[in-house]
Every structure is written in structure tokens, then in C-alpha cells.
């Protein structure tokens, strides 16, 4: 009678050590990723109440920018919200909708803030804004997106009988408004119902 002897080889010790190191490496990497997840985010989300005096769209850098760097903010429709180049703002390149509505910090050559301040945000300003930094050759050095959500504080409902002589639509603000403000009433289809320049009224 033949008897076959089978000897099972034990798992090599070097393989066990390698497996332990691999598991530990995965655990450490996962912990670091969770801890520093804010640093890897490319999209920020900012929320502001409609009627606030301003809102800041954050964009920061930890490196020195060249003197001739160009910083350009655009919205989701690819409109130029703000352009900064050669040490000064470039309002001529700015979309007309945003003129007089934005402000940017001046010390761009130092590592720090490229954040944009958007004045008097309304529901129409909710959008995805992109901060892009270019060098002189037009190569992108940095790009960051910010999602802006604007909360409407209140919605009024006014009822009127058909054929009435008139109806008043209420609109009040508790914040100080700039002198050159323009008031625009629009309907749900973005049709202008009434436009009034406050400065012109005061001069009369």
C-alpha cells in the first residue's frame, strides 16, 4: 500500500510583515485624507442672505505670484466678474453687470488672499464663480471654484381684486444703500417693470 505524505508550506514570515505594513499604510493614508480633506477640495460653498451688504468669495494661495500675474474671476456663464492685472483692477474687461459691484484685495504678490467681495448680493447672483490665476504667457497657475447660494429671506404675497385702480408691491431694506443705487423691478420672466435711478430723483 502506497502512502502519500503532503506537507503544507507555512505562510512566509516576510509576506506576513508585508501584509501588515500594507494594511497600516492604507489606514494611515485614509486617516490623513479625512484629516486634510479641506485642503484637497477644489470647490467651496458660500451661503449668504439676500440683502446683505456683501459676501466674500474665498480664494487663497500659499505661493508667491509673479508681478505680471493676472487674476480673473468669472461666473458660470463665463462672464468676467473681476479682472486684476499689473497691480490694478481692469474694469474695462469686466462684464457690465458686475461693474461697481466687486472689490478685490490689493496685495496679490504676497502669499495670501485673492478673495473677491461681491456687494449687495441678490438671488440673481447665485452662481458658480471661478478664480483663475495666469502668468504672462497665459498659463494657468491656479484655479478655484466657489459656489454661491443666496437665500431669499422673505416672499410677500399680495392679493388684489381684478379691475382695482392700483396695488402696492412692498419692498423695504434695513441696510445702508450707496448713493448711486438703481432700483429695478422685474417679473418672473426677467422683464423689467420699472427702473429708477435714485441719484437722478434726488437731483430733481
Image (cartoon, rainbow, N blue to C red):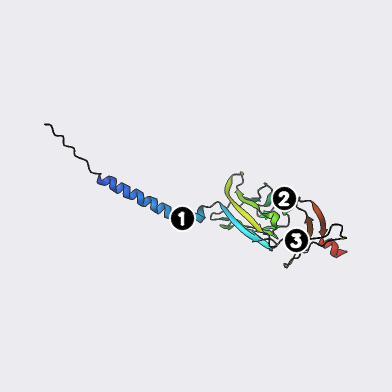
Question: In the rendered image, which residue does mark 1 sit on?
Answer: 34
Quadrant of the rendered image containing residue 168: bottom right
Residue at the outermost top position:
1
Residue at the outermost front position:
161
At horizontal 61% and vertical 53% (from top left) the residue drawn is 147
Question: In the rendered image, which residue does mark 2 sit on?
Answer: 95
Question: In the rendered image, which residue does mark 3 sit on?
Answer: 157
Q: Is residue 69 visible?
A: no
Residue 185: % across, % down: 79, 57
At horizontal 43% and vertical 55% (from top left) the residue drawn is 32
Q: In what element is the residue under mark 1?
A: helix
Separation of marks 2 and 1 at Cα, in angstroms: 39 Å
Q: Earlier in the sequence, mark 3 or mark 1?
A: 1
Separation of marks 2 and 3 at Cα, in angstroms: 34 Å
Q: Quadrant of the N terminus?
A: top left
At horizontal 79% and vertical 59% (from top left) the residue drawn is 183
Question: In this view of the protein, which residue sits in the foreground, 84 or 15?
Answer: 15
Q: Is residue 184 left or right of residue 29?
A: right
At horizontal 59% and vertical 56% (from top left) the residue drawn is 45
Q: Earlier in the sequence, mark 2 or mark 3?
A: 2
Amino acid at each position: 500500500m502506497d502512502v502519500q505524505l503532503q506537507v503544507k508550506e507555512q505562510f512566509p514570515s516576510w509576506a506576513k510583515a508585508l501584509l501588515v505594513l500594507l494594511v497600516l499604510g492604507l489606514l494611515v493614508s485614509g486617516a490623513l485624507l479625512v484629516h486634510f480633506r479641506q485642503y484637497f477640495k477644489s470647490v467651496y460653498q458660500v451661503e449668504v442672505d439676500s440683502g446683505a451688504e456683501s459676501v466674500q468669495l474665498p480664494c487663497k494661495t500659499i505661493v508667491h505670484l509673479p508681478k505680471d500675474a493676472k487674476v480673473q474671476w468669472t461666473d458660470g456663464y463665463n462672464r468676467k466678474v473681476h479682472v486684476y492685472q499689473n497691480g490694478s483692477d481692469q474694469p474695462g474687461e469686466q462684464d457690465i453687470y458686475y461693474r461697481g459691484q466687486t472689490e478685490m484685495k490689493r496685495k496679490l504678490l504676497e502669499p495670501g488672499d485673492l478673495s473677491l467681495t461681491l456687494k449687495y448680493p441678490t438671488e440673481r447672483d447665485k452662481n458658480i464663480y471661478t478664480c483663475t490665476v495666469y502668468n504672462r504667457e497665459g498659463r494657468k497657475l491656479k484655479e478655484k471654484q466657489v459656489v454661491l447660494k443666496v437665500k431669499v429671506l422673505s416672499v410677500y404675497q399680495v392679493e388684489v381684486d381684478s379691475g382695482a385702480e392700483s396695488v402696492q408691491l412692498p419692498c423695504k431694506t434695513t441696510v445702508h444703500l450707496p448713493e448711486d443705487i438703481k432700483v429695478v423691478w422685474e417679473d418672473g420672466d426677467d422683464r423689467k417693470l420699472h427702473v429708477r435711478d435714485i441719484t437722478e430723483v434726488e437731483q430733481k
